Amino acid sequence: MKEEHVTGILLAAGNSRRMGRNKLALPLGTSTVGSMSLRAAARSSLQQTLVVAQTFDPLEWLISEHPADKKKWELVRSRFAERGQSYSLRSGVQAAEDRNAEAVMILLGDQPFLPSTWIDELIHQHIRSQPAFTASSFDGKIRPPVIFSQRLFPSLKQIRGDKGARQLLRSLPSCAGITVSFQEEKAFYDVDTKEEYEWLLNDMPVPFPT
């Protein structure tokens, strides 16, 4: 069984149009939505996490974390990220390919309750089964994060418009990958609207996920 070098790609270059402000900078306890999402990736068994941000993003959402976490991620500026998610995705995949990644895990910057242990479980299942993709799921539906093997990098880089990797998943036969079912819906919460942010505040776990 070959152990693949899995690199995380944290998509953090959205325009937050529905929120009306940078959703990654929204406070959650002593942290922010974006920092909590990055912390989970940095504390997982991912080899490295590439944080894809817009060219002129001041990164106001980025809270200083434990020094060990800082060694596990790298910033990638996506020149045309404001045009749609596919530009961020392609920038991340190309950067991962340049760093000899053998697989990538696509993560969302606005998914702050995702535990690092779930990331580790996806990596474990992917290495064990060696599929084209390994996706997390809840209630029978695929949710981010998703791991894509190197053989799908060309397809990921062909995605266009304001679309993400879900477009590619829909085009692949189910036998090409595996899904790992998780039972806690809260971990899949993402933040697009003020109402969803309020739900996050009301459902904020204590202690925070690790």
Image (cartoon, rainbow, N blue to C red):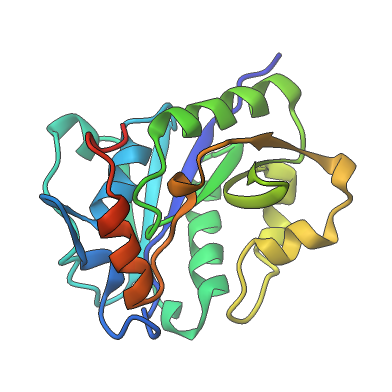
Q: Position of residue 209 (x, y in %)?
A: 31, 36
Instruction: Classify residue 116 by image quadrant.
Output: top left
Above or below — where is 160 with respect to 37? below
- Give the position of the C terminus as an image quadrant: top left
- Give the position of the N terminus as an image quadrant: top right
Above or below — where is 15 with respect to 62? below
Front-most of 99 and 132?
Answer: 132
**Which residue is pictured at 44% across the width and 80% down the height?**
80
Answer left or right for 93 relative to 127: left
Q: Position of residue 47 (x, y in %)?
A: 43, 31
**Which residue is pictured at 49% across the width and 27% down the height?**
120
Answer left or right for 7 relative to 122: left
The outermost residue toward the top is 1
**Which residue is pictured at 42% across the width and 26% down the height?**
45
**Which residue is pictured at 39% across the width and 36% down the height?**
115
Q: Position of residue 196 (x, y in %)?
A: 38, 68
Q: Position of residue 13 (x, y in %)?
A: 38, 70
Instruction: Classify residue 75 by image quadrant.
Output: bottom left
Front-most of 173 and 205?
Answer: 205
Above or below — where is 178 with respect to 121? below
